[in-house]
Amino acid sequence: MGRKPFSVKLVLDERRKKSDKEYPVYIRILYDSRKADIFLYEYVDPAMWDAGRIKGKTIYDTYLNNKLQDCIRKVNLIHLELESQNKLIDVKSIKDAFTGKNQIKEPNMLEYFIAYIKNLEDRREHTHGVVQHYHTTLNYLTDFLVSIKKKDILLKDFTIKELQN
């Protein structure tokens, strides 16, 4: 099964004009023929809007362009993180993660390793012996964590320094 279409872009909502002729800026997430719009709490004059960017050269315009690009980056990172963790990806889960309603949990070493082994077994690309080696390594990892008196460790905290201690 291939990757599903995903895109992120900035749009002005021309249906909700403010009294001073400015329109609200939304980030639009498109995934698998579904869409979600997130209001970014910014308003822009349509005369200054150019396909996802503000044409002006003032300090505020530069700040706003940077803020908008950061929002796009954040949505792309959320999508990649959900994809790498083999979690359900839909526009609602991306929107919830972006708005903070559903924080993406950082993976633990054991959780990741168990999921990786399950993925190997499901794909059936490796022999039983190779998968068995991964199970053996999982046992060693579990024993190591017991020896340092931890149930699990965050993947980002698992470093050479942790191994040497």
Image: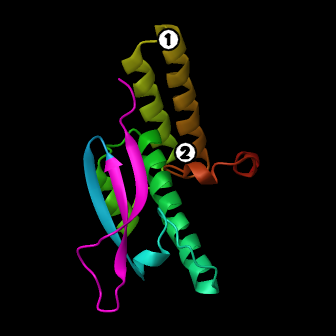
Q: Is residue 61 above or below residue 30?
A: below
Q: Quadrant of residue 89?
A: top left
Q: Is residue 102 visible?
A: no
Q: Amino acid at mark 1?
A: His
Q: Is residue 96 visible?
A: yes
Q: How busy is the neighbourhood of tag 2: few (under 14 within 10 Å), some, or many (20 plus)?
A: few
Give the residue at mark 1: 126
**Sequence-wise, which precedes: disc 1 or disc 2?**
1
Q: Is residue 129 magenta?
A: no
Q: Which residues are magenta?
A: 1-30
Relative vertical location of residue 47 with respect to residue 83 in this rendering, above or below: below
**Mark 2: which secondary structure?**
helix
Which residue reaches farthest bottom?
19
As drawn, the residue found furthest toward the front would be: 47
- Indicate the quadrant where residue 120 lies: top left
Mark drawn on residue 146: 2
Q: Position of residue 130 (x, y in %)?
A: 54, 13
Residue in the picture at 27% in, 53% down:
35
Which label sits in the foreground, 1 or 2? 1
**Which residue is drawn at the image coordinates 56% and 73% (left, top)?**
55
- Callout 1: helix, strand or loop? loop
Q: Nearer the viewer, residue 50 or 60?
A: 50
Q: Amino acid at mark 2?
A: Val
Mark 1 crowdedness (10 Å alpha carbons): few <14, some 14-19, many ≥20: few
